[in-house]
Image (cartoon, helix red, strand yellow):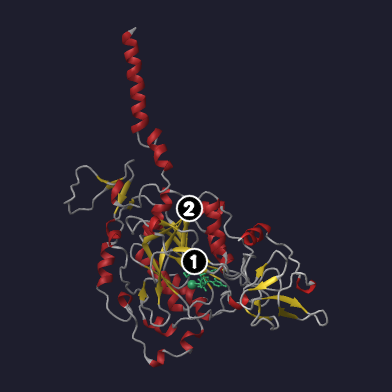
Amino acid sequence: MRRKEKRLLQAVALVLAALVLLPNVGLWALYRERQPDGTPGGSGAAVVPAAGQGSHSRQKKTFFLGDGQKLKDWHDKDSIRRDAQRVGNGEQGRPYPMTDAERVDQAYRENGFNIYVSDKISLNRSLPDIRHPNCNSKRYLETLPNTSIIIPFHNEGWSSLLRTVHSVLNRSPPELVAEIVLVDDFSDREHLKKPLEDYMALFPSVRILRTKKREGLIRTRMLGASVATGDVITFLDSHCEANVNWLPPLLDRIARNRKTIVCPMIDVIDHDDFRYETQAGDAMRGAFDWEMYYKRIPIPPELQKADPSDPFESPVMAGGLFAVDRKWFWELGGYDPGLEIWGGEQYEISFKVWMCGGRMEDIPCSRVGHIYRKYVPYKVPAGVSLARVFTFTWREDIRPGDPQHTKKFCFDAISHTSPVTLYDCHSMKGNQLWKYRKDKTLYHPVSGSCMDCSESDHRIFMNTCNPSSVTQQWLFEHTNSTVLEKFNRN
Ligand code: LR7
Ligand code: MN
């Protein structure tokens, strides 16, 4: 009887121990799954050197995650060494010494950046490694998903497009690049036709697709995504330069959690002299203002990572440069195909990923340069509206016109007796600030008067506030009563 009990106890203890300790099953696996971050992006903490490989060993070290997944140093040391030795125009991301002849307006006209300068810089130019020093010692999963790299373009410059492709081929482990898909959005420049096809024939991993009419960047990206064969799809703009070891840190995060969309840090390639540098303030979170304009705002101190080279969450992405698990992209419904030409899609995908149980991260150890144009060079077909796709209707200025608020005129008043005029909205309140009052008058704090309507000719002007005057009573339709009540209480 007692021996039987003892055996039973032993068996129970064994099962419990197995549950706790065995990799990939039981409590440990459960615990791992519940860590929202997974293990830190290949950083030292959860990593132990494999047995028998002392830290002084000169050979490539193998590292294991706690559950036996191997980690490796993905840096291509040879290519880094070769890059470091390069000299010449624009090498090491240095500014090209522009001459007056290159400074002319004509150089910018077709692309919004200086194509003369771009043409003078090697397609294989070297870039400065401006990553945080900790990135040098980060290890990523030895087995990573591969990716299709999708590059939409419309009338892109020859050298800027080719440099994008070259930088990807030069700085990505070949086994991780399933293909590069160039998707031409109905360009009409000659160099993007046969010459591009002949050139790219030299690179077996590059495919060219073309839309049948001008689709805009969103549907063009979707066309690329629809033919992609990689586990992951990575989108780039057509005037980018991938920096050292940019790809493994992105794919590693997706391998650990397939619902993570990851963005590299976007560096600035100057549109004049092509120097390569970080954006002002470098690591910031994505945000947007009341006009739906994309902004970058500092990370609050309490959310800053102990190691600034670790991935951090961002509410919205800049839009053009990111990697996403291919199946997850389609589970999210891709992009809304009704989005025209340019804009808005970065919010759509960002909102969807957060609302559907995914997450979005910026990856400081992955850096890609982007040419920020001086102006938009391409035409938007007639009849296509680029109106922002989302609007917030509650403001303290008043914008008459269509309900989408695409017209940017506001009611403006300059004095306590002046006519009410329409003026370009400046969003700085002041003369365009109106207060809704309980007595249904529209009060203008700057002039100290109310909006009035003349009974004879219906012109609108400012007048001393008189709540009992019928010509100062305004009917508010579609009001947000919660906001109004709160406002009136204060
Ligand atoms: O009709 C078009 N068809 C296209 O194929 C218009 C553009 N394009 C291509 C174009 O060649 C380029 O490769 O689409 C890509 C993006 O167009 P850009 O470079 O004119 O746009 P941008 O750099 O000003 O735009 C930023 O915001 C856009 C909003 O729709 C997209 O999300 C871009 O991808 C995005 N770029 C970035 O996020 C890079 C960082 C800049 C920022 C912010
Ligand atoms: Mn761009």
Query: Label 2's element?
Result: strand
* Left or right of 181 in this view: 433: right
When asked about the image quadrant of residue 90, the answer is bottom left
Circle 1/circle 2 CB separation < 8 Å: no
When asked about the image quadrant of residue 476, the answer is bottom right
Q: Is mark 1 within 8 Å of ligand 1?
A: yes
Where is 335 relative to 419, above or below? above
| Observer-nearest of 382 and 41 | 41
When asked about the image quadrant of residue 214, the answer is bottom right
Residue 28 screen position, x and y as percent: 37, 36
Q: Earlier in the sequence, mark 1 or mark 2?
A: 1
| Observer-nearest of 183 and 17 | 17
Residue extending furthest bottom? 100
The residue that appears at 65% across and 61% down in the rendered structure is: 488
Q: Which residue is mark 2?
A: 359
Judge the density around disc 1: few (<14), some (14-19), many (≥20) Cα neighbours within 10 Å.
many
Residue 461 screen position, x and y as percent: 72, 80
Q: Is mark 2 within 8 Å of ligand 1?
A: no
Residue 390 screen position, x and y as percent: 62, 64
- State the quadrant of the C terminus: bottom right
Where is 274 relative to 9, above or below? below
Q: Amino acid at mark 2?
A: Arg
Residue extending furthest left? 56
- Between circles 1 and 2, the one closer to the viewer is 2
Q: Amino acid at mark 1?
A: Gly
Q: CA distance from mark 1 to mark 2?
A: 17 Å
Q: Which residue is mark 1?
A: 320
Q: How many marks?
A: 2
Residue 163 screen position, x and y as percent: 40, 73
* Left or right of 222 in this view: 38: left
| Observer-nearest of 490 and 361 | 490
Judge the density around disc 2: few (<14), some (14-19), many (≥20) Cα neighbours within 10 Å.
many
